Amino acid sequence: MIKLMRSIGPNLSLLAKVLRESEEDVKKELEGIKDLYFTPVFSFGSLGFNFDEKECVRKSIREDLCVSLSKEGLRVKEFLNYSGIPEAYDFAYDKWDLSFSVKAEGERPHFQYEGDSEVILYSSLKSTYSFNEILKGFFNKGIVISFILDYGRRDYVIDVFSFNKVVRERLEYVPFIRYSVTLESDQGDMYLTELMIPKDYLLIVLEVLKEMREEVEILFTKKKIPYFHGII
């Protein structure tokens, strides 16, 4: 169901039809998932960044690296919606399998048009009631092209920037991967991959990033309450 909702979101009636279950049963199953949130992804052709020191903490892994981003943003070449690895999550006990044996399946939404909208970075919809008529209209017109799903407790968000595609491929085995964006920059393709991590697994994920420190360029994390705790 998690993978299906990447395409259709918390659309209860459509979920029931596809799964061939009653709306009441689908609703009950969704309500049983701990901390389930939906993040609408809007169709966009470029991605901008706000490096506000009051809200963001940034760390350069390599001292000699400097990345400059234009005010207009960087062109998006590819967007992959992972929404984690549901096979690695124990929905009953809110536990994760970090054996890194399962690879996340990234879904490529089809862009209907290229505008200035950006991906919403944090979940904003919590229930099926959030899928109102306005959002349905956006979805039907192709303005909303996908939904990122977060489930289970999450405490930290880390955005990983790299010019090496191998970094993204390795992070596809981390069950907390949300999405990845391939951006066109003056220095070549840049891969932005976002992780959202429960505090009990933070050190393990940081060890994974440490092993890739020669390929990872920059880490970003939010420190603004009430979204996530600060890391650096």
Image: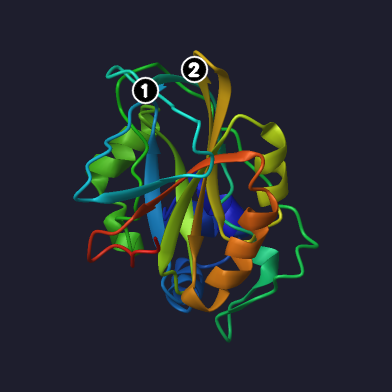
Residue under label 2, please give it: 185
- Quadrant of the image containing the N terminus: bottom right
Label 2: few (<14), some (14–19) or many (≥20) C-alpha neighbours in 10 Å: some
Residue at figure coordinates x 59%, y 57% from the top left: 84
Q: Seen from this angle, which residue lies furthest top?
A: 186
Q: Seen from this angle, which residue lies furthest right?
A: 101
Question: Which secondary structure, mark 2?
Answer: strand
The amino acid marked with disc number 1 is Leu
Residue at figure coordinates x 54%, y 39% from the top left: 62
Q: Are marks 2 and 1 in contact (CB under 8 Å)?
A: yes
Quadrant for residue 133, please give it.
Answer: top left
The amino acid marked with disc number 2 is Ser
Q: Position of residue 96 (x, y in %)?
A: 63, 75
Q: Seen from this angle, which residue lies furthest bottom?
A: 93
Residue under label 1, please give it: 69
Q: Position of residue 103 (x, y in %)?
A: 75, 53
Q: Is residue 195 left or right of residue 213?
A: left
> Compared to 43, does 193 lie above or below?
below
**Residue 45 visible at all:** no
Residue at figure coordinates x 58%, y 84% from the top left: 92
Quadrant for residue 101, please give it.
Answer: bottom right
> Compared to 81, does 152 lie above or below?
below
Which circle's residue, 2 or 1, is located before the other in the chain?
1
Q: Nearer the viewer, residue 209 or 118?
A: 209
Q: Position of residue 15 (x, y in %)?
A: 51, 56
**Residue 118 visible at all:** yes
